[in-house]
Amino acid sequence: MEYKNSKKAIYTPIIIALILVAGMFIGRNIFPQKTDRFIFTPTKESSYNDKIDAILQLIHNNYVEKISIDSLTEIAIPQILHNLDPHTSYLPSKVNEEAHESLDGNFDGIGVQFNIQNDTVMIINTISGGPSAKIGVLAGDRIVTVNDSLIAGVGITNAGVMKILKGTAGSTVKIGVKRKGIKDLIDFEIVRGKIPLYSVDVSYMLNKNTGYIKISRFAGTTYAEFMKAAEKLKAKGMTELVLDLRDNGGGYLNEAVNIADEFLPAGKMIVFTKGAYRKRTEYKSTDNNELINIKLAILINSWTASASEILSGAIQDNDRGIIVGRRSFGKGLVQEEFDFKDHSGVRITTARYYTPVGRCIQKSYKDGYENYYTDIYKRAYDGELLTADSTKFPDSLKYTTPGGKIVYGGGGIMPDYFVPVDTSGFTPFYRAVTKKGLIYKFALTYADNHRKELQALKTYEKINNFLNKKNVLKQFISYAAKQDITHKNSDLKLSGKIINTRLKAYIARNIIDNDGYYPIIREIDTDLKQAIKILNKNK
């Protein structure tokens, strides 16, 4: 098939690159649902195949070199599980502990957000109430030493920084920071503490009656965070809500169920699960329906998965709201976790989940692990992200909601309203500065150089107005030219608004975090604009 001068041929590689970046943040392993955890102790009766035990024993007693059977086992287990399905997996002890840490909603550390700029760790923000904020560490400080060891200019990585700054609550770490205007390093001794991890990125009013809540994952605190945000917005006059689940890889099933419950009248099916060795388990709505009268639109995309799809499916199948965006990932498998005494664990798929009308949205994995995950990129090549969803499902996967709407199983949640990826601003200049990460780098440097005056502004509206007056786009063009990237007037005509908006949003994020980023980036968010338009139209 040839796309020689087509729009699809030009923009498909760019879209795939953007999807790849999103995938890097989400990771290849979509989060499992929260289930009971079991400590598994192997017994003689649990040995289903004596060959495995016998082979390991033969190696231990006869192999030409001494070898660690434990290490061999660690290699063998993933290979066995790899042949089942893409979500049955083995987690070594460290990985397992980190996974629980992120989903349980906290970790032990010093409470800073950082970035590595010019081989130096720069603090972007301190977490309010955290150990660093309490003793006077400031945004803009550069960490030069940790426990008297130099970490600046030695090629340290994000993972390396996390390793030396995280630690058990109550333990101490010494850091030496360089602060602008002060000649010598400032030494801090920080007592590590519990640092909360929030899953509701931001909540604010889009207009006088439309609220917006962004959930990044479903962790142990998500429902509580969501309800707190929703009550705050209701108090401000919210009568309709845009719930953003884009790039949300899932998490705890119960948290998603509890949120769905708030929008539905009592007795409605939210989701049910069943498997060969698991009886059918139903989750129905209760009297917890504080948001029953709030009009709802949910935003989804290709990386919306698992618990996010459960919530989206419950709303769609009960005709309770609208789904806007692009087809979701398609994970309809339920894992249970079995932990071993060494803190490693195995997540085994024990059931499938089904939306209220009975559809399983799990996409096929019969062609293997790699094809399962690269299906996202295939969708881009097939043009699915640019035109109305081209995927056709057989009639056997067709279902009808109580309101008469046709929905399909077998490959993710199909949106009620499709919104294509906006490629109108993908000019050569935009591609060049994006490829080199110049928008982000400029924003970080600008925020650092103007931190005091920007922090004094406090709100995104004032920061946005300030940056408009300063014409940061013009400054960025000069900055890009110094990096040997020049522009044409036609580039700026198409890309100018996108670049300018991204610059302002990233600068604001470096000052007031997501409360600055999301309200500004909405200027170029076509999914969000469409959702607001539909909600207003349906009034």
Image (cartoon, helix red, strand yellow):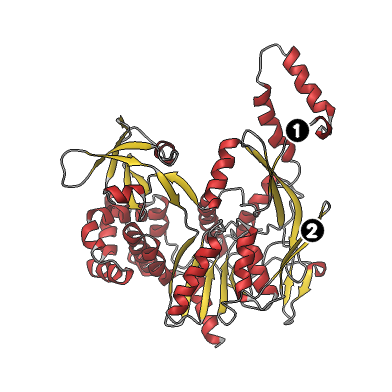
Q: Vertical placement of 533 versus 384: above or below?
A: below
Q: Which residue is mark 1?
A: 42
Neighbor class of circle 2 (other Cα within 10 Å; few <14, some 14-19, many 20+) is some
Q: Is residue 404 visible?
A: yes
> Alpha-carbon distance for marks 2 and 1?
26 Å
Give the mark nearest the N terminus, 2 or 1: 1
Q: Vertical placement of 510 versus 122: above or below?
A: below
Q: Is residue 87 visible?
A: no
- Quadrant housing residue 61: top right
Dot 2 falls on a residue whose secondary structure is strand
Q: Amino acid at mark 2?
A: Lys
* Pick the front one: 102 or 302: 102
Horizontal side of residue 141 vs 232, given as left or right: left
Q: Vertical placement of 484 versus 63: above or below?
A: below
Position in image of residue 490 (x %, y %): 36, 67
Q: Residue at x 75, y 57 (%)?
A: 352
Dot 1 falls on a residue whose secondary structure is loop
Q: Residue at x 62, y 33 (%)?
A: 342
Q: Amino acid at mark 1?
A: Pro
The disc placed on residue 103 is: none
Position in image of residue 456 (x %, y %): 23, 64
Q: Which residue is mark 2?
A: 274
* Pick the front one: 447 or 214: 214
Position in image of residue 420 (x %, y %): 56, 69
Residue mark closest to the camera, 2 vs 1: 1
